[in-house]
Amino acid sequence: CPLVCPCWFQSHHLHLARQGFQVVLAATMAPGPLPEYHLRKKGPPPALPDELVGEILLRIPPDDPASLLRASLVCKSWTEAVSQRWFRRSFHNLHPSPTALGVLHDWHDEAIPTFIPATASPFSLAAPDRLLWQAVDCRHGRALFLSEDRTEEFLVWEPITGAQQRVPIPVAFQFGNTTAAVFCAADGCNHHDCHGGPFCVVFVFSVFDEDAETSACVYSSETGAWGEPTLMHNDFIVDFTYYSSVLVGRSFLYFMTCGGFILEYDLARHGLTWFDTPDSCHSKDEPTCNLMLAEDGGLGLAEELNPHLQLWSRGVVDGRWVPGRIIYLESLPSLYGAPVGAQCPVHVLGFAEEANTIFVTTAAGLFAVQVQSGKATRVCDDHGYGKLIPIAGLYTPMPRGEHLGKVAASSC
């Protein structure tokens, strides 16, 4: 069985597992008639011990959230099992690498859901209405939205729990081009289960009037207030429309502009710095790269070479861009033979930090490319997205009546 390995069966109560595992399979499959095995029984099968149920459900792959959700709805005891903190902790221990659950987008097409799943099983989350909120960032189990008119407030949304918190726009902001980032503020947190904990929001806004200025200020959920803005003069117009942020360690946030310049915000010193992308990224009228984490954990870039992706890393000491390995997209079998090249360009639309996954669009649709393994997974058709906000983590259902996740009839 794909959910429990044979050696695990041998080390536990094999006779109980054989009797009860068909119940688990029935719960995780589409509704239908019970197997013939149950029809021959004169009564319901004996109940499985709670600890055995938990051990079985832990073996459901993290890329199959729909099956875990169906199993949690079988009965009250199973619902309680998957909603316990020990289950979430054990699930993270078994699967230490977060999964790219899906993406948020700001494409104004009511026929396309706000949240698009990237998992193997159909899966959806009740994301805020994009006609009212613009997705800006997602990190550490929280997604950040800005009110559509960009003048009122932020919305911090936890995709797994459904919790929401509104944050007013700082009074220092009057107008200009904006971007923002959200991250966990708990000391020593491994971000496996930091829902409901303290967080910070970094708001960046740039104006080009008589003087060009870029400002950044930080909101703390612990104090409920914005700090004083950090101001920096610049000689160019700043537009963050098509790019989101990357957090390096716990100290540096990076934002990229449509002109190819990168803004560094030092969280410890509250300092702002501009620097440029590699020269090759300016070979066209617009940048051909997007922010990501380098293999050493520092700042990196994914450059579109068509049909390849050139990875870059930035030196910590000298700030020089160093070319790294190349991902040959046309050699990935999971691209389904999608044509890539000069006539069918590939565009990098987003990067999931915690899952180390690049989202690219091709002639065959939107794909998630895991950087370390090189595995590419088709997400959906290409709907012309300008920017994607990936959601990464591990999905565990919440108690009935509290969770907002649901099994979708189909993906996009």
Image (cartoon, rainbow, N blue to C red):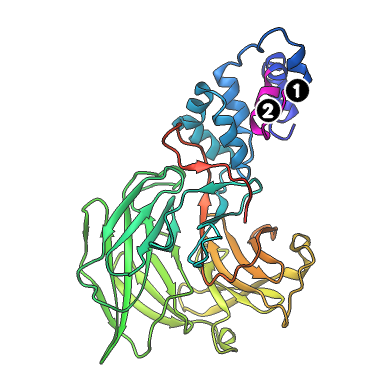
Q: Along the horizontal axis of the image, is 120 left or right of 132?
A: right
Toward which corner of the image does residue 35 lie, by quadrant?
top right
The amino acid at mark 2 is: Ala
The residue depicted at 44 percent of the width and 56 percent of the height is 139
Residue 186 appears in the rendering? no
Q: Nearer the viewer, residue 113 or 197?
A: 113
Residue under label 1:
35
Q: Is residue 150 visible?
A: yes
Q: Position of residue 345 (x, y in %)?
A: 68, 78
Q: Residue 65 placed where, x, y %?
A: 59, 41
Overall secondary structure of the magenta stretch? Answer: helix
Identify the residue position indicated by label 2 in the image: 26
- At horizontal 49% and vertical 35% (from top left) the residue drawn is 89
Please tell me whether residue 141 is drawn above or below residue 231 in the rendered image: above
Q: Residues within 10 Å of mark 2 (few under 14, many from 20)?
A: some
Does the magenta run of residues contain 135? no
Query: Against 355, is 55 above or below?
Result: above
**Element marked by disc 1:** loop
Q: Which residues are magenta?
A: 20-34
* Residue 120 locus on image (x, y percent): 66, 48
Q: CA distance from mark 1 to mark 2?
A: 8 Å
The three-letter amino acid code for the residue at tag 1 is Pro
Whether tag 1 and tag 2 are in contact, CB under 8 A, the answer is: yes
Could you tell me which secondary element the residue under label 2 belongs to?
Answer: helix
Q: Where on the picture, by quarter, is residue 257?
A: bottom left
Quick one: quadrant of the N terminus?
top right
Say above or below: 157 vs 61. below
